[in-house]
Amino acid sequence: MDLVKWERPAATDLWEAFDGLRGELDRALDPFRVPDVAGLFDRTTAPAVDVIETEDEYIVIADLPGVEKKDLELSVTGSLLSIRGDKKSEQESEKRKFFRKETWVGSFNRTIDLPDRIDSGRISAELADGVLTVHIGKREEAKTKLIAVSVK
Amino acid sequence: MENKSVERRRYAVPACAISEEGGTVTVRVEMPGVPKEGLEIKIEGNELSVLGERREAEARGLYLVRERRSDSYQKLFTLDDSISREEVEASLENGILTMRLQVKEAAKPKRIEIA
């Protein structure tokens, strides 16, 4: 559920393209719509993220249930933040019989292009209850400044 | 008929995996953002209900991307008669709730030795 599967639409069948168009329209009018955001090199499975801009920082929040700190890798290049990691499965054994499996294991990668140049010196991340929160500071010149105008 | 649910809220259905091995049924429910205090597990008759309250402070600012759901989680499981109501273990780690239920001795397959 929280590791959202992103499906690339197949363009082999003409009718499928119409179906896709209808789906797209339905989604556009859906009040609970989730925007499609996925980087070019992202894997088909990527965690759902929130990106929030505040006055002096960007906050990126990702749902990563079952991902341990040691299996997570964060990197920043320019204005690109990349979250990659491995979601490991519990101990598997041949005798284990699955009745239902909606969960997913494997590696994931998510790249987020942040709007402004970011201050790579001011980044902090924390992982708690399966949720990753990354705080990325804005560069001084990217912050909105108030300029006092005196009227004569 | 009386409606059991007093408050009507929107809940997210968490992803889950149910497996069995050697008389132990393992139920894993993915609930990122739910701390231990926000979790409520109940067994009523044949129903096992899991409620996970997300306890995250709403971030103040402009949402540039919003894909995560902020709803709390709810999931109902129906328990078979073969599952023991008494021995239920639950643990929460990294946003995944793992519950271990035991199959009753009487319901386990018996091996009959041929004399």
Image (cartoon, coloured by chain):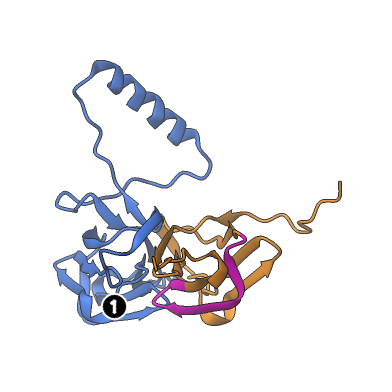
Chain A palette colour: blue
Question: What residue appears at the point 75 percent right and 58 percent down from the top-left corner?
Answer: B7
A113 or A103, which lies in front? A103
Question: Where is residue B99 drawn, in percent x and y?
Answer: 49, 72
User: What residue occupies the far right of the structure in this picture?
Assistant: B1
Colour of chain B as rendered: orange
Q: Residue furthest front?
A: B115
| Magenta range | B81-98
Q: Residue at x 24, y 75 (%)?
A: A139
Of A141 and A50, which appears nearest the observer? A50
Snapshot quadrant of residue B52: bottom right
Q: In the image, is B71 to the left or to the right of A96?
A: right
A121 horizontally vs B101: left or right: left
Q: Residue at x 18, y 23 (%)?
A: A12
Whether residue B66 is visible: no
Quarter of the N terminus of chain A within the rendering: bottom left
User: Does B95 lie within the magenta span?
Assistant: yes
Under circle 1, the secondary element is: loop
Classify residue A145 by image quadrant: bottom left
Vertical placement of residue A25 versus B93, above or below: above
**Left or right: where A131 falls relative to B7:** left
Q: Mark 1, chain letter?
A: A
Q: Main secondary structure of the magenta part?
A: strand
Question: Residue A140 location, x and y as percent?
Answer: 26, 77
Q: Which residue is mark 1?
A: A68
Q: From this view, report whether residue B106 is shown above or below residue A44.
A: below
Q: Position of residue B35 (x, y in %)?
A: 51, 78
* Image: A38 above or below B94: above
Is residue A30 on the magenta stretch? no
Quadrant hosting residue A136? bottom left
